[in-house]
Image (cartoon, grey):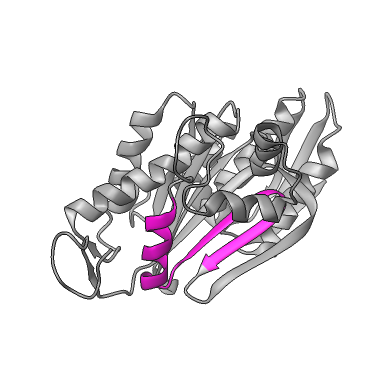
Amino acid sequence: MSVISNIRNDFPSYQLLANLYQKHADDFFENIPLELRFWFSANMASALGAVLDKLTGNLNGISFSHIDSAIQLILQKNDFLSFYGYPRAIDNHSTTIQYMKLKPTDGKFFSQYVTDELLDRTELPQLSAALKEKMTEAIYEIFVNAQIHSETEHIYTCGQFFPAKNRIEFTITDVGIGFQEKIRRRFGKVLTAVQAIKWAVQDRHTTKQGVTGGIGLAILREFIVKNKGKMQIVSADGFYEYSHRGEVSQTMLAKYPGTIVNLQFCTDDQATYLLASEANVNDIF
C-alpha cells in the first residue's frame, strides 16, 4: 500500500512522487494499491499520471483503494480519474485545466490547448494579444523540449485555478531521459541534476544540434518576476525553483523518472502586460 498524502506544489511533494516511483520501479506483474489523502493539488495529476504510466509499463496494475472525497471530485472534474475507470464530474466553476496525455506529435493541439485552457482564462492578468502569442510559443517550447530532447512516449499536462489563493498552476511532465542524461550524451558533460537544470534554463543553451536558443523560458521567467509567480523544474533528483525572490535548488533523495515543469501565475495582479514594441509603459517585455 502506498499512501499519497498532502500533495502540493512544493519540494516535499515532488520528493514523495519520486519516492513512489523508486519504491515500485522494480515491480513486475504486481497490483499497486494507492491511497490519496488530505490534499492533492489537481495540477500535480500531471506528475502522478506520468509515474503511474511508467509503473504500468512494467505490466503492473494500479488501483485506488481509497481517495478522500474532495480529492476524488476534483480529479474527476479534470478527467485524471477517467483513465482509471471513474466517471467524469462536471466542473461548474471552471477551476480545472483538463488533464491530457499527449503524444509528442500532438504539438499543434497542445498550442491550442494552452491558449484555450490557460492563457485565455479571465483570471489571469490582462495580456496583449502579441504577448499572449509569445507566451504560448514559450510554453509550446517546453512541450517541444520534452518532444525532442527527452525521448518520452507521452507528455502529461493539466492545471488548476485556486481562487482562495489567487493563483493558477500549470504543469507539463514527461517520462524521458531528463536534462542530466541528455547533456551527458550530447556534450559528454557530467553534471548533477540541479546543475543540468540550471544549464538548460540559461538563454542560448540547448542540446538541439544545429539550433541556437534555450528551452524557451526567458519570457516566462520575466513575466513570473513581474507577476510574482513561480517556475519549478524537477528532473531526476534535481529540484529548481525560480521566482521574484530568486533561485532555490535542492537535491531529492530519490530520482523522478522524467522531467516536471510547473508554472505558477498570480491572479490578483491588476497590471496590464504588453511587449516593449507595443507601447512605452512600465509593464513591458
Give how far across and how far down residue 56 sits, in percent.
Answer: 71, 28
Residue at position x 56%, y 42% from top?
Answer: 173
| Residue 135 appears in view | yes
Give how far across and how far down residue 25 sits, in percent.
Answer: 81, 36
Depth order, front residue of 1/113: 113
Give how far across and how far down residue 20 sits, in percent.
Answer: 77, 47
The reply to whether the magenta stretch includes residue 168 is no
Depth order, front residue of 29/215: 215
Residue at position x 50%, y 37% from top?
Answer: 145
Say if 164 sits above or below 34 in the image. Answer: below
Say if 249 sits above or below 71 in the image. Answer: below
| Residue 85 appears in view | no
Start-end of magenta stretch: 217-242
- In the image, taking residue 214 as reference, residue 269 lies left or right, namely left
Depth order, front residue of 42/173: 173
Say if 127 sits above or below 186 in the image. Answer: below
Viewport quadrant of the C terminus: bottom left
Give how far across and how far down residue 200 sits, in percent.
Answer: 57, 49
The reply to whether the magenta stretch includes residue 229 is yes
Say if 267 sits above or below 89 in the image. Answer: below
Label tally: 0
Residue at position x 63%, y 69% from top?
Answer: 248
Residue at position x 36%, y 72% from top?
Answer: 226
